Image (tube, rainbow, N blue to C red):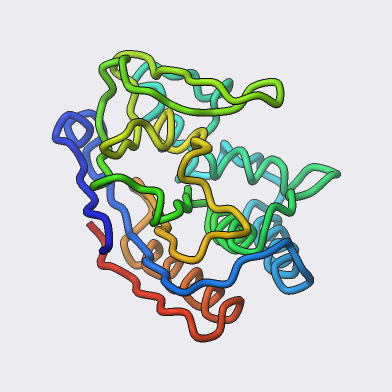
Amino acid sequence: MFPTLTVHEDVRALVPGFTHLAVEARGLVNGPSDEASAALLDDAARRLAERLDGRAPQDDPHIAAWRAAYTAFGAKPSRTRNSAEALARRALADGGLPRINRLVDAYNAVSVAHLVPVGGEDADRIRGGMRLVRATGDEPFPTAAGGAGTVEHPDAGEVVWRDDEGVTCRRWNWRQGVRTRLTEESVNALFLLECLAPMTRMALEAAGAELAGSLEKLSPGASVTVHPVA
């Protein structure tokens, strides 16, 4: 069953105008990065360079809006960058974008090409519904540090995505937890695209449609559904 997605009123009050779009995919075939997924990343990096035309990612109006949102809940946007800005910086650097696996490559490419935060979760590992909330500070966040598993806790008031078991992504869309991340064995996934003004709903829907198309090409026969903007 597709997980419900809820945005708490405390978050909407903090950052009015936040919208998100979900892409549900069933029957995916993941695996190591390959020529097809690498091509998506290379094309995204080219499109990003054309879009920015020499500017830094933080000078893009949508990234600037995310920086303001991070500041609103107490994060330092130059230290903990939203996922779209962090990926964009890597895309423009000499090393380029990382190759993770086919599914992660696909959503990272859309994030970079459209400068929109995109996350991917293994739907079979989500417990209950997904909720965007301001943390109490007690929620568990399983992660890795120094090659070993560990459990962190968000700061009180931090905006996080969580399910019934704990935090799945800290600082809104900064760092994903290990419990629900997409692995090469993942077959069912939930992808979340998030935007703030001045990015329009039409632009967000275009990014979602592109992701759906990439997933269908990488996993012929998969069932992919784009859920309306919320």
At horizontal 79% and vertical 42% (from top left) the residue drawn is 93
Residue 67 location (% of width, % of height): 46, 31
Q: Quadrant of the N terminus?
A: bottom left
Please identify the quarter of the rendering in which residue 59 is found.
Answer: top right
Disc tally is 0
* Left or right side of 89 for 17: left
Q: Is residue 104 above or below residue 226?
A: above
Q: Is residue 14 above or below residue 205?
A: above
Q: Nearer the viewer, residue 178 or 100?
A: 178
Q: Nearer the viewer, residue 108 or 152?
A: 152
Q: Is residue 123 above or below residue 87?
A: below
The residue sitting at the bottom extreme is 221
Q: Nearer the viewer, residue 203 or 83?
A: 83
Residue 142 location (% of width, % of height): 48, 28
At horizontal 39% and vertical 19% (from top left) the residue drawn is 154
Residue 26 location (% of width, % of height): 42, 72
* Left or right side of 101 for 128: left
Q: Nearer the viewer, residue 211 or 24?
A: 24
Residue 95 location (% of width, % of height): 84, 44
